[in-house]
Image (spheres, helix red, strand yellow):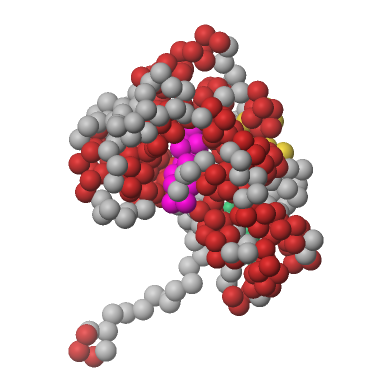
Amino acid sequence: LDVFTYDPGFSSTCSTKSAITYIDGDAGVLLYRGYPVAELAEHCSFIEVAYLILNGELPNAQQLHEFDQNIRRHTMINESLRAFFNGFRYDAHPMAMLTGVVGSLSAFYHDTTNNKDPEHRKIFAHRMIAKIPTIAAAAYKRYCGQPFMYPQNSLDYCSNLLYMMFAVPAEPYQVDPVAARALDVLFILHADHEQNASTSTVRMAGSTGTNPYAAIAAGIAALWGPAHGGANEAVLKMLNEIGDVSRVPEFIRKVKDKSSGVRLMGFGHRVYKNFDPRAKIIREQCHKVLKHLGKENDPQLELAMKLEEIALNDDYFRERKLYPNVDFYSGIIYKALGIPVNMFTPMFAIARTVGWVAHWIEMIADPTLRIARPRQVYTGPAERSVIPINQR
Ligand code: CMC
């Protein structure tokens, strides 16, 4: 301890230098490569933002076209993965499938991925960003027992995802452009968030020089937890559990009683202690989408708004600086779009793949890279001798 700092949960440890994303938690500021996320959500497509996060600058029309074409070229996954999907139990959680199948990509690209070659890193980025929606959609199809749909590369990124999830071979399917744009905005807001748990996991795994697809699989596993990306699923489960606006005060009482172990899901953030700028945009998007779909009287939206109102005016939440985070409203949008609850976290994973890939590239290209190797404060017994088993 004389030399090392004990910092559980890494509340005050900077694990790296990074030029990708800037957060000012007190001021509620989130910038990707210097651009406010709200401006990007208003003016750009997700693919445009992906280019920015990866390359540091917004693309011109030609650069965007080339990048978009590269992503579209890589959307298919190896046909043998069909057998892998079918090997999962029928009710496997899509995040379990996502972790496994993305990890398995390292088996397909093990000898063609040289971490030191910038061209290889670029192909990895295109492949990973292109294939993650196909894998997530296939996990969903496996879950509901429908045939896998091949990607339609004439469609944009989010329309293609909706197509692969909801189209069936026997019937024509028309993507709703409002739904696709809503997804695009949600993905922009989720694309990166500096050194969060899953990104730090990707960096930590990647720092050993492992195959990058394996590092991304590690990030997906970290994202799954309810304190991180699993929160969007947990919010919907919580709203279902509360059931009715009349039961909100009782639920808030339960949250405030620490012995209950119940948290208000979708509230609180390690870094944002004033408001989460993403939550504000998502809240607006939520009202817009529900109106478009004729679901503005959705009882869960009403419930969420009541919950938010009561919590924001309660001393417990005010004293601890707990505000709605990005996931408080995202689940309501996903649900309105017909996306089942267990696919909420895979949606987050698709968007965050851009951030994970950008951070992996930033790290692996850094000539000063060292393996991530935290220390500990040892609390076990002092050195002692083994007593032979017949004397214990
Ligand atoms: N409901 C009730 N109490 C809470 C909550 C909550 N959601 N979050 C924190 N607290 C309390 C906590 O009990 C503690 O109280 P006390 O000081 O009396 O012991 C205090 O607030 C500080 O909490 P903490 O656990 O030390 O805070 P943290 O920075 O370690 O955790 C968090 C941040 C996001 C994990 C936590 O706020 C939480 O569990 N929120 C609910 C899950 C959630 O919505 N996660 C999504 C985060 S945003 C998406 C993403 O990027 O992952």
Query: Residue 131: where, in percent of width, then height?
Result: 37, 31
Magenta stretch, main secondary structure, is helix
Ligand 1: image quarter = bottom right
Q: Which residues are magenta?
A: 341-356
Q: Pick the residue in front: 18 or 352.
A: 352
* Number of marks: 0
Residue 51 falls within the magenta-colored stretch: no
- Residue 222 vs 57, above or below: the answer is below
Q: Quadrant of the C terminus?
A: bottom left
Residue that appears at 77% across and 64% down: 314
161 lies left or right of 143: right
The image quarter in which residue 121 lies: top left
234 lies left or right of 346: right
Residue 346 falls within the magenta-colored stretch: yes
Query: Residue 86: where, in percent of width, then height?
Result: 23, 46
Q: Quadrant of the N terminus?
A: bottom right
Residue that appears at 46% across and 37% down: 350
The outermost residue toward the bottom is: 391
Q: Pick the residue in front: 385 or 15.
A: 15
